[in-house]
Amino acid sequence: MRRHHNKLYFGKYRFKTVLKIPGNLMFYPTTDQYLIGLRAKHPEAHIVHKLANFIIENRKMIKFRMQDKLSIFYSNKDIASDLINKFWNYWYKSEEVNPKHATDKKDVVSCSRLPHGKFQYQIHLKKDAHIYSDASERKNLWNLLSRNPKDCLITSGPVEIFLNGRNPHLFRGYFYVRTEKWLSPIYMIASKMIDKVIKYEKV
């Protein structure tokens, strides 16, 4: 499921807590069974036991990832406070999402900066888009996008070579347009190919 960090984190959590714990990548994979084994393997390592226990006890109430030297947790306020208290010596930073930056609208993403600085709409093409289109439709869409580079942007290589005729197949992809006025001609040309349109709202 696609989410954006400027919504409520994962559509649910307002707080992001970052810890700097040496050797945090040893916590992968993060299944309970692996973490229990990790505790047994490092009986003298207090921080290993402490973090493994925290993950096991709170798994259903958090999202988390280990990234290089950073352990990043997404949670509610109480768990974020608990994290900071329990891992004070490893606490690096915290962030809170302001609720006004969140939106419950389907396929609308709140962001502090539009994609590539100016594009408000992201148009996703269907899986197996070649089944839902013919060569003429693809050519017409390519002509529209390629001739208006200030307002249309293809960042996906597979989409580009599909629309310009160099590859007859496309299994997924997307492109950007700057404003809503571009949606009408795109739908007129390629409505059968379009899976969904994501709108970015700058806050």
Image: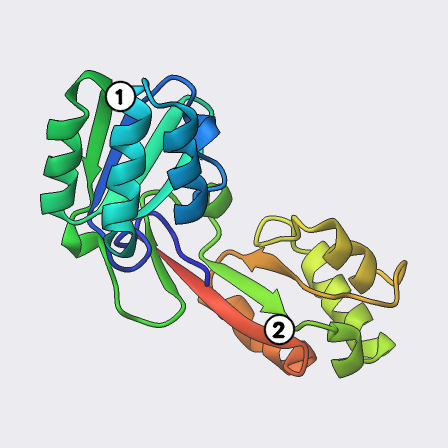
Judged from the image, the secondary structure of the residue bearing numbered disc 1 is helix
Q: Number of labelled discs?
A: 2
Residue 175 numbered tag:
none
Residue 196 place in picture, x, y as percent: 53, 73
**Left or right relative to 103: residue 26:** right
Residue 29 place in picture, x, y as percent: 49, 41
**Left or right relative to 27: residue 9:** left
- For image coordinates 41% across by 25% down, the residue present is 24
**Left or right relative to 117: residue 176:** right
**Mark 2: which amino acid?**
Ile
Can residue 185 be seen here? Answer: no
Residue topped by disc 2: 186
Can residue 189 be seen here? Answer: yes
Closer to the camera in the image, 43 or 81: 43
Tell me where residue 170 sits by quadrant: bottom right
Residue topped by disc 1: 46
Residue 90 place in picture, x, y as percent: 24, 19
Judged from the image, the secondary structure of the residue bearing numbered disc 2 is helix
Residue 171 place in picture, x, y as percent: 74, 66
**Mark 1: which amino acid?**
His
User: In the displayed structure, would residue 183 be above or below residue 160?
Assistant: below
**Left or right relative to 102: residue 155:** right
Comparing labels 1 and 2, the label whose residue is closer to the camera: 1
Crowd band around label 2 with a 10 angstrom C-alpha radius: few (<14), some (14–19), many (20+):
some
- For image coordinates 83% across by 67% down, the residue present is 169
Mark found first going from the N terminus, 1 or 2:
1
Closer to the camera in the image, 51 or 117: 51
